[in-house]
Image (cartoon, rainbow, N blue to C red):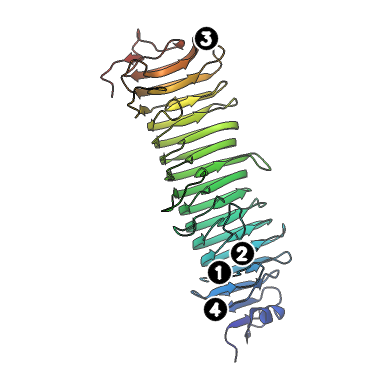
Amino acid sequence: MATEVSLRKISSGLITFYSTYSDASDNAEEYDVISIYADLDEQLILKNLFDIYIEPGTVINYSGEEPTIYDKDVAVCNITGGGIIKNSYSGTSKVECIAVYNSGSSVNIECLSIECTGDNSSSVGGACVNVEAAERFSLKCKSVSNNYNAAIIISDCNDYFINIQEVESGKPNTPNAGAPVISIDGSGSVYINSLTCTGYGSCLKHSGGNLAATIYKTNTLLPANETPPTAEPVVMVEEGNSPPELVLYFNEIKNYNSNDGDAVKVTGGNATLIGNNIYCVNGLSLNLTDNIQSAYIKSDNIISLTKGINIDNENDPIVIEANYIEGSNGNDGVVRSAAGSNYVLRNAKIKNTYTGTTTPFSIGIYIPGGSANDQTIEIENLIIVTGTEENDFSIFRNDMTNVISIKNLGLFVNRDISDKVELLIGDDTNFKYISDPSVV
């Protein structure tokens, strides 16, 4: 007697056993439950209004050229239990483990893990989960991993919930070639303990909708013995089909790639990031440019070993609040702002670690030349520590003609501000601006 799959009829409670999922599915009616007790090399096509239970530890590993689980037609379906979902198709066109294609589908999945091989390129072929369109999608599991590229793609869904302990793309011998680990265009919530890209893709790319996320650890790691190509930022926010709205709570966002790659890059929409540590080895800790509507970033530490923070916005003010901001001379200063920028720096000690004597010297805040008052800058309760050479400055204006005004509400520095910088409120006569070599 077949014991791999059972079908429980909701109308009578009777259980019938089958050898395959497809046999059970062919006999299922609305609100029946299919249970899977043994490993299967079979595709699970979802049907409307019946549920699937997968026994803990059971492996569903389809080897055909289609997703292991998908909605051929509109489906409202729950998949529960502790199953392991894989796809072992070995052809050149990689496919997903789980795919949702229909805008009217509502799919809820609870499992142990989802594991995919993916496509060895910067594309997102063979994603673990691909929600191309759905009315609602929910995923709760222990781990989601892809050998090469995207773990989760949500393209068109405005009601999703993701709760996963570990999400990973790439491994030391099979690095991610540049695809985002999680790519989202839609509105919903994400809770992840650890999000890792071993390779060169972004960990999180958000391009539209309202995303509320809590991600404890988000790291990009450089694989050993790799010739490093250009690396993507760990967190990327850019405008796609609609302006993105991101609220992200985190413990750490870190980019360990030694050749390139920012920690956070925002080029559109609105972003709020609140957490403890933002860090990168050879990129910008924050790259805030282009069509940003607004940004609020609060972190205990914001550190780049080689560069710093880049600001280029012309809309609502970018507010950066930190205990400690560190950078070097790779982007002219620890903080560099382009013409037209509008920003507030608050409650931070800013330190430039560069100790050389050649251009561009050691500068805290670097302001390029331009017309008078072409930036709106406010500094509140800052300590700026730079080098002590003749051409080192706490705030430097690269202009011999135009004076720029800065609203100052408390500034302590070890080197003076340069010519053509005017403090509108605090100055050395009322002790809101103090320049002293002993400031460290």
Q: Secondary structure at mark 1?
A: strand
Residue underneath mark 4: 39
Amino acid type, residue under disc 2 in the picture: Ile
Q: Position of residue 345 (x, y in %)?
A: 45, 26
Q: Secondary structure at mark 2?
A: strand
Instruction: Count residues near mark 3 (Cα–Cα under 10 Å), then give few for <14, some for 14-19, many for 20+.
Output: some
Amino acid type, residue under disc 1 in the picture: Ile
| Pointer 4 or 3: first along the chain | 4
Q: Who's the residue at 42% across and 43% down the image?
A: 258
Residue underneath mark 1: 85
| Pointer 4 or 1: first along the chain | 4
Q: Secondary structure at mark 3?
A: loop
**Residue 423 in sight from this viewpoint:** no
Measure the alpha-carbon separation of dots 4 and 2.
17 Å
Q: Who's the residue at 54% across and 26% down the image?
A: 317
Residue underneath mark 3: 402
Q: Nearer the viewer, mark 3 or mark 1?
A: 3
| Pointer 4 or 2: first along the chain | 4
